[in-house]
Structure formats: structure tokens, C-alpha cells
Image (tube, grey):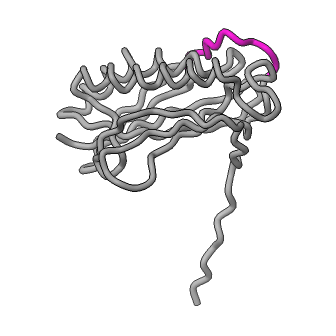
Amino acid sequence: MTVFRVQVNYRTNSGGKWSNVYHMRGALIGDIRSNFESVGVPALRPFLHAANTLVSVLYSSDSDDTFISDTLELPGTSADTASQLPLFNCAKVLFSTSATGRPDYKFIKGWLTETLTEDGQIETATRNAMQTAFQDLLTDMASEDTPFVSESDDLWGIVSVQGPVQMRQLHRKRKKTVTP
């Protein structure tokens, strides 16, 4: 089995862009693509505000240069249509792995609104619903023989969602190394 990289690209109606990268284990890149688009994409869209779009998904192999890029242009289907928090405010989802050490995590942007948060915290019911949805996604993808894994091929296990709203930078400036 090979580890494949799945990059999900998003866009706001005002032009802001971001992406989340997942790793999945499977026999063929076509299996990853088919299963992610039938199971993963529908599971992610409810955590995307209706004013945002899931633009595309890039599937690539970590072992060679093969890749598939699909343009989807699907709007978010979040039931909460209140005004969004700024894009750098996001939910942090933690995924325990089969290896010891720190869990993997993903920042879910483009979803939080004032009605989903209170005093800098994601509401408990909202957080529990997100946790259940992501746990179901892991179970469903594993049943399709394309489980989510860490970049080093450690199987993802238990999901938890942090309570505080996370303040994630949109872009980090990288320090340039000057070569003489």
C-alpha cells in the first residue's frame, strides 16, 4: 500500500485562498480519488460556510510523480449562514495516530460564525457534532480500504476538537537564506 497526498483547495467569495492536506493509504491513486470524492468531499462541505467554495482536490503519490487534479467548484453547505469570523479564526481538529507522540491536526477555516462561538470558544454541541462527523469520516474511509494516515503512514484513530477558537495565520513569511 502506498501513501497518497490529498490537497483540498478552498476559496472565499472575496478571493481568500487556503488548503488542507490529508494523507491516505491505498493501492491505487484512482481508488483514493474515487473514495475521497464520494465520501470525503460530502463530509467536508458541511464545515464550509455557504459563502466559500471547495475549489479543487489534488491527489498525488508520495512515491512517484503521478497526480490527478479535479476542479469541483462546490459551495459550502454549512447550515449556519450568519456572518463569518475572519478567516484566521478556525477550529483545530486533532487526530491521534498509531504512533506515540503528538497527534496530527487540521485547521478547519471558512466555517466559524458568531453563532457557532461564544466567548472565544466553539459551542459544545457544535464541537461534538464536528468531532462525530470527522470520526465517521475516518471510519467510512477505512471501510473503503483507503484510511487516513499521517505523512509517515501511521493510522489515524480518535478525533477530538479543541474548544478555543484558534488564531491561525493566513501566511507565514519565510526567512530567506542568503548564500554568498
Percent x, y of residue 11: 65, 29
Q: Which portion, as a residue range, is magenta?
A: 73-83
In this rendering, position of residue 58 left or right of residue 152: right
User: Is residue 152 positioned above or below 86 on the image?
Assistant: below
- Residue 149, picture quadrant: top left
User: Is residue 147 positioned above or below 99 on the image?
Assistant: above
- Closer-to-camera residue (40/18): 40
- Closer-to-camera residue (25/174): 25
In this rendering, position of residue 80 left or right of residue 147: right
Q: Main secondary structure of the magenta part?
A: loop
Percent x, y of residue 61: 29, 43
User: Is residue 141 positioned above or below 75 on the image?
Assistant: below
> Is residue 142 shown in magenta?
no
Percent x, y of residue 90: 68, 35
Q: Residue furthest front?
A: 124
Residue placed at 64% from the left, 14% from the top?
A: 78
- Residue 54, picture quadrant: top right
> Is residue 79 shown in magenta?
yes
- Closer-to-camera residue (79/116): 116
